[in-house]
Image (cartoon, rainbow, N blue to C red):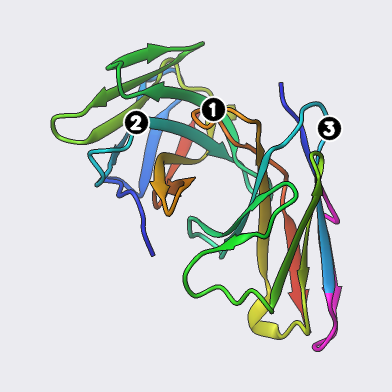
Amino acid sequence: GAVVSQHPSWVICKSGTSVKIECRSLDFQATTMFWYRQFPKQSLMLMATSNEGSKATYEQGVEKDKFLINHASLTLSTLTVTSAHPEDSSFYICSARGIIVNQPQHFGDGTRLSIL
Amino acid sequence: GESVGLHLPTLSVQEGDNSIINCAYSNSASDYFIWYKQESGKGPQFIIDIRSNMDKRQGQRVTVLLNKTVKHLSLQIAATQPGDSAVYFCAENRESGGYNKLIFGAGTRLAVHP
């Protein structure tokens, strides 16, 4: 089946640091990639939708200057949490989907981000 | 934020029993639904999907039922095994602002006891 790789799987850093998370589709071309945030014992909340070669579309309440998304190729999207603070600590998960809309999104295994 | 609702936050079953996880959705225009399984510390794993022109779809040990009249979705797991223990999410594909996105339900934790 489709494989999505997310890196790093966990990161601990100091407040004020910027952190980059990578999401790669390993065996298919991901026209669209999605970034989610998940707090403990809660559901996934969509942060932004990223189409290859265009600007990301952010959900209401998500700061685009805080969470920078780049989708420069059909196999790679990155999320950069800029000037991270403790309240940004969370589980960040990416997903990828091919060109057909009504098909499953395939998820990475998430990145546990802890800001001290 | 937006969400698809669930009836049962936690479900405990005995190994070998059948499990039924329910989900209610709000947008009658949604045309595609997916069930995901999420184990601790991992990303969601695709289980089964169904399009709105169907009311039932079967996979290996899993069946998804869709009732569009009452906007209800269910996941049935036959002969539940300890490895089925996880959180299960239903997700509704919704178009918004020209984009298609998944709206996830709150999740149901399935605990399988030997």
What residue does disc 1 label?
A103
Q: In what element is the residue under mark 3?
A: loop
Chain ID of residue with mark 3: A
Give the magenta range.
A6-18
Are the residues at dot 1 and dot 3 in contact (C-beta closer than 8 Å)? Answer: no
What residue does disc 3 label?
A26
Identify the residue at horizontal 36%, vertical 59% (top origin). Answer: B2
Chain ID of residue with mark 1: A
Vertically, is B101 above or below A92? above
Chain ID of residue with mark 2: B
Type of amino acid at the residue the image marks with label 2: Asp
Instruction: Please rate how many residues cluster around mark 3, counting C-alpha atoms within 10 Å: few if below 14, some from 14 to 19, many from 20.
Output: few
Residue A79 placement (x, y as % from top left): 76, 62
Vertically, is A55 above or below A108? below
Identify the residue at horizontal 49%, vertical 23% (top origin). Answer: B48
Q: Of residues B62 and B80, which is closer to you in this image?
A: B62
